[in-house]
Image (cartoon, helix red, strand yellow):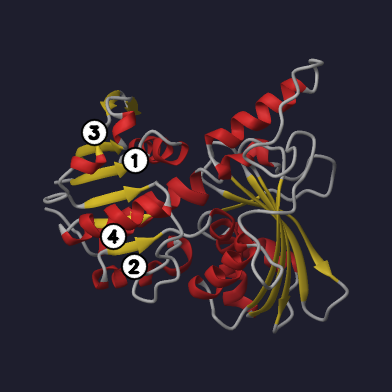
Amino acid sequence: MGYKVAVVGATGNVGREMLNILAEREFPVDEIAALASRRSLGTECSFGDRTLKTQDLEQFDFTGWDIALFAIGSDATREYAPKAARAGCVVIDNSSLYRYDPDVPLIVPEVNADAVMGYSKRNIIANPNCSTAQMVVALKPLHDRARIKRVVVSTYQSVSGSGKEAMDELWNQTKGMYVPGQEVAPSVYPKQIAFNVIPHIDVFLDSGETKEEWKMVAETKKILDPAIKVTATCVRVPVFVGHSEAINIEFEDFLDEDEARDILRESPGVMVIDKREPGGYITPIECVGDYATFVSRIRQDSTIENGLNLWCVSDNLRKGAALNAVQIAEVLGQRALKKG
């Protein structure tokens, strides 16, 4: 027997990826519903070799459905996720709404799958921020070996993290650079994104950090270890899909770069591509469509006693969002919602 699964926000970038990945991974689905707002009613979405027509989220009854993968904003999630949860459907939410709720587990299956059983408190599980998800996949096996004290991370985040409108803005601005009189002014971003980088993601906080940077700190502590100190600088770059991170790690114990490389090669969800030659590393354009979190440029940091540097790249629409949500559903099915 399989599950009755609803994908909420099925017409968006992440929702479409959720449908793709459910089909690719052959998740045991008996029935599937593609849900969206009324303005998208009837829009067609692909699910394997099937075509689904979206249904109206506002009118949908979640009673009898097992799992709902939510890929809509926090405001809509605040309205509809509790309705689904009260109807007995387990919500796996991609928004930031529930990530910091102590009664809602925040899950990256390669890191803290055991925490999934906490879903029963609210019938809700949170999916982490895209930049956090790929980082903790790389950090977890190293933390188990040498205990991480501090992480300094700089991110290079693609525009797909801001949605379709941001991808369109990058495309149109890029074209406009070559056609006099057709320049495109920023609307999604505060400054031009084409041929530029913007050190600003989400809103600014009183501390001077952005909320995206705060998320990476808070989520790493909740998922991995509250004792780890984290500081982040998050930057939007003119890349369509794929987030990159330069990560500096300080450990309690010494960890040799060769051992770190070997550990990561054997770690779930990680692919090490690390040759010390031109092109011997992974860039974001190469990770698109892949499930893995790629790690390159592993090297000792000689400026601190027990330090390593590494480069981490992943498809943010997959591991950073849709794939992680489907992996959570897989763990949930294996451990809590067993059928047959």
**Is residue 94 at least partly visible in the picture?**
no
In this rendering, would 280 be left or right of 99?
right
Determine the image quadrant of residue 208: bottom right
Q: Is residue 290 above or below residue 246?
A: above
SS for dot 2: helix
The residue at 31%/37% (across/down) is 36
Give the mark, 2 or 3, whose residue is nearer the N terminus.
3
- State the image coordinates of residue 37 (x, y, percent, origin top left): 32, 37
In this rendering, would 327 be left or right of 315?
left
- State the image coordinates of residue 211 (x, y, percent, origin top left): 60, 63
Give the mark, 3 or 1, whose residue is nearer the N terminus.
1
Q: State the CA–CA distance, disc 2 to disc 3.
A: 29 Å
- State the image coordinates of residue 82 (x, y, percent, origin top left): 25, 60
- State the image coordinates of residue 98 (x, y, percent, origin top left): 40, 65
Q: Pick whichever, 14 or 338, lies toward us.
A: 14
Q: Residue 55 carries which label?
A: 3
Q: State the CA–CA distance, disc 3 to disc 4.
A: 25 Å
- Mark 4: give few (<14), some (14-19) or many (20+) Cα within 10 Å: many
**Is residue 233 at least partly visible in the picture?**
yes
Dot 4 and dot 2 residues touching (CB under 8 Å): yes
Q: State the CA–CA distance, disc 4 to disc 2.
A: 7 Å
Q: Name the residue under label 1.
A: 22
